[in-house]
Amino acid sequence: GVIAVDFGNSVDWWLGDWESEHGEEHWIAASGAIYGIGLAKDGSFEVMIVDDADGPGKPDGRLRFFAMPGGAGSTTFEQATLDTAGVTFANPAHDFPKTIRYATAAGGLAAVVAGDGKAETYAWKPGSRTPAPELEQADRAFAADTAARKIDGWLAAFAPDGGMLRKGARIEGREAIGDAMKDVLASGTLAWHPIAAGKRGTVGFTVGKATFTGASLEDNWRSTYVTIWKQQPGGAWKVWFDTGRPVNE
């Protein structure tokens, strides 16, 4: 990804599959962003994104860590320190944590979240990822149905308790998701495909790349995304959470 190229101190050490007593984390690069997906043993999930720009446009030379535990609204932590061993992000206004640090540690990965005089440390060792070809297939079907049926195809993929991120805030429910996406999908073609997938029990994820083709060249854009999938009682996989980042051209 662009991040590893743009920064003198590469964060390639962060990428890969990691496990701990709490569950697993998977860090995947996609067109200048790094997606972190936490799958806990209790069936919960966390989405984290590291990007070197605040939004569309050129990278500005500063890493940001976007945290979305359980698919909640996004909280931003900005780069405080970056060295060959790790990176620290800070958000002094946040209740807890105020800082998040990821670093290499004895062939593994260490995460420290801290604030207000307390700190929690998580140790990760190299792990593996359970392949999820059924989620890659579900993701491609989601894209094909959206291309064919626009907003109806988009909405059909979501679980009843599914949600997505819009301008950093979580939206959920058929009406709210429809209001957020119907104009976008009506004005052009949104196409995407997965580049990675994994699962733990009845929760899984796809990470991929997307393109939007609008009425004119100025309307076109590229993005990357992560989709969290939840297996339903009947066995089908539905979208539990969806978000992404613009590619910084």
Image (spheres, rainbow, N blue to C red):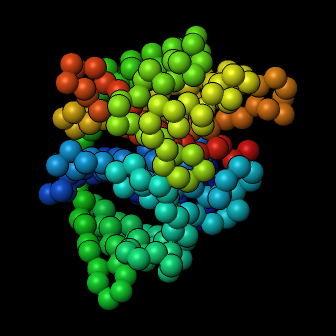
Residue 59: tell me if it is visible: yes
Q: Nearer the viewer, residue 84 or 154?
A: 154
Q: Residue at x 44, y 36 (%)?
A: 173
Pick the quarter of the image with the C terminus. top right
Measured along the vertical axis of the image, is residue 133 above or below residue 246? Answer: above
Measured along the vertical axis of the image, is residue 148 above or below residue 208? Answer: above
Q: Residue at x 22, y 38 (%)?
A: 200
Residue 30 is left or right of residue 99, and the answer is right
Residue 11 is left or right of residue 16, and the answer is right
In the rendered image, the residue lying farthest to the top is 148
Residue 219 is left or right of residue 64, and the answer is right
Q: Nearer the viewer, residue 57 or 181?
A: 181
The image position of residue 163, as x and y in percent, is 43, 40
Measured along the vertical axis of the image, is residue 55 above or below residue 121? Answer: above
Residue 85: tell me if it is visible: no
Q: Quadrant of residue 13?
A: bottom left
Q: Quadrant of residue 107?
A: bottom left
The image position of residue 21, as x and y in percent, is 14, 57
In the rendered image, the residue lying farthest to the bottom is 117
Q: Residue at x 53, y 37 (%)?
A: 176
